[in-house]
Image (tube, helix red, strand yellow):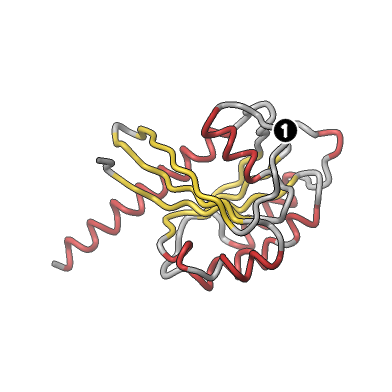
Amino acid sequence: MSDFTFRVCIFGDGGVGKTTLIERYLTGLFKDNINTTVGSDFYKKSLIIEGKEVLLQIWDFGGEIQFRSQDMNSYLILEAGGAIFMYDVTRYSSLNNLGGWIKSLNIGLKEEIPIMMVGGKKDLEKSRAVGKGIAEQFLRDFGLLELIECSARTGENVNEIFEKLTLEMMNKAIYNKKEKDKVE
């Protein structure tokens, strides 16, 4: 049995690389021909962080606008322990839509959770449309946890994204338990 179990929601516009990121994280492989996520998909990953066994339940939400309102406001995110907002560093519009995604996510949450901001397709530097400074401003404006740019193609920073988010969720769970124990 795991010491911790967390639901992680990954959201962002279609085509930013959410499913590719997950596939790289789970298998260590880059898959070039991945179908568009319709609705949402579910994955599991066990890992060890600071000597604790953690089970991640990873929910990959389709990036089309109809899925934002349909699934993001459902029970799927109600128990989320953390989230990843992903944008494509070669497509400014995918970053600019952050406000709508955050609003949709917050409607379904019962409490504030750590949200990691991830810029995907870092390996396409020559096609970059979003400078890191612009993304960091969005990060500050929305009060998100941290910005990490990654490449599912090369594997750069893929594991770090999930490890840092998991550590934040663990720290929050430990803090909440201590606070609950004080009241009792």
Residue drawn 34% across the image and 48% down it: 5
Q: Quadrant of residue 48?
A: top left
Q: Is residue 78 left or right of residue 18?
A: left
Query: 51 above or below 140?
Result: above
Per the image, the residue denoted by label 1 is 32
For image coordinates 61% across by 46% down, the residue present is 147
- Residue 23 x %, y %: 58, 36
Instruction: Give the total number of marks visible in the rendering.
Output: 1
Local secondary structure at mark 1? loop
Name the spot of residue 150 as percent of width and height, x first. 65, 36
Q: Residue at x 54, y 29 (%)?
A: 27
Residue 62 place in picture, x, y as percent = 64, 56
Quadrant holding the N terminus: top left
- Outermost residue on the bottom side: it is 107
* Mark 1 residue crowding within 10 angstroms, few (<14) / some (14–19) / many (20+): few
Q: Amino acid at mark 1?
A: Asp
Along the line of sight, the residue nearer the viewer: 46 or 84: 46
